[in-house]
Image (cartoon, helix red, strand yellow):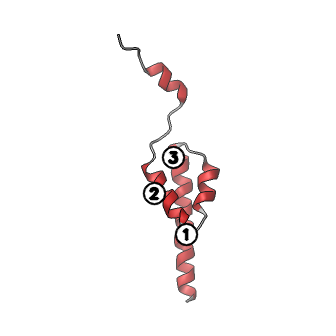
Amino acid sequence: MMQLVILLLIIHFTIAYQCYRYACIKGYPVKVFTILGCIPYFNLVVWIYLLFLPELEPFESHSHEQKQPL
């Protein structure tokens, strides 16, 4: 029984770390997604959500690259 608990804890903290990593990579608030990733069962939802979210781009680069259509 103890081995099962240890396995589940390892999986839980691995998913929480993945939430932290994807939030850092994609530019989303790291603290928020890490805290949400530490909630059991909800962390799977947060992890999958982060997998499908697009990367955030700085607002300034958006305005300079777009040109007005004629």
- Which residue is depicted at the point 52% across and 57% down? 46
| Element class at badge 2 | helix
Q: Nearer the viewer, mark 1 or mark 2?
A: 2
Which mark sits nearer the N-terminus, 3 or 1? 1
Q: What amino acid type should be assigned to the residue bearing mark 3?
A: Ile
User: Residue 68 location, x and y as percent?
Assistant: 41, 14
* Residues at marks 2 and 3 touching, judged by CB atoms closer than 8 Å: no
Residue lying at the far left of the rendered structure: 70
28 or 41, nearer to the observer: 41
Which mark sits nearer the N-terminus, 1 or 2? 1
| Element class at badge 1 | helix
Inter-mark Cα distance, 2 to 3: 15 Å
Q: What amino acid type should be assigned to the residue bearing mark 1?
A: His
- Which residue is depicted at the point 61% across and 63% down? 38
- Residue beneath label 3, please? 25
Q: Quadrant of the C terminus?
A: top left
**Numbered mark located on residue 30 in the image:** none
- Residue beneath label 1, please? 12
User: Residue 1 location, x and y as percent?
Assistant: 55, 89
**Numbered mark located on residue 48 in the image:** 2
User: Residue 11 location, x and y as percent?
Assistant: 52, 71
Inter-mark Cα distance, 1 to 2: 14 Å
How packed mark 3 is, by other alpha carbons closer than 10 Å (few <14, some 14-19, many 20 or more), is few
* Residues at marks 1 and 2 touching, judged by CB atoms closer than 8 Å: no
Q: What amino acid type should be assigned to the residue bearing mark 2?
A: Ile
Residue 52, above or below 6: above
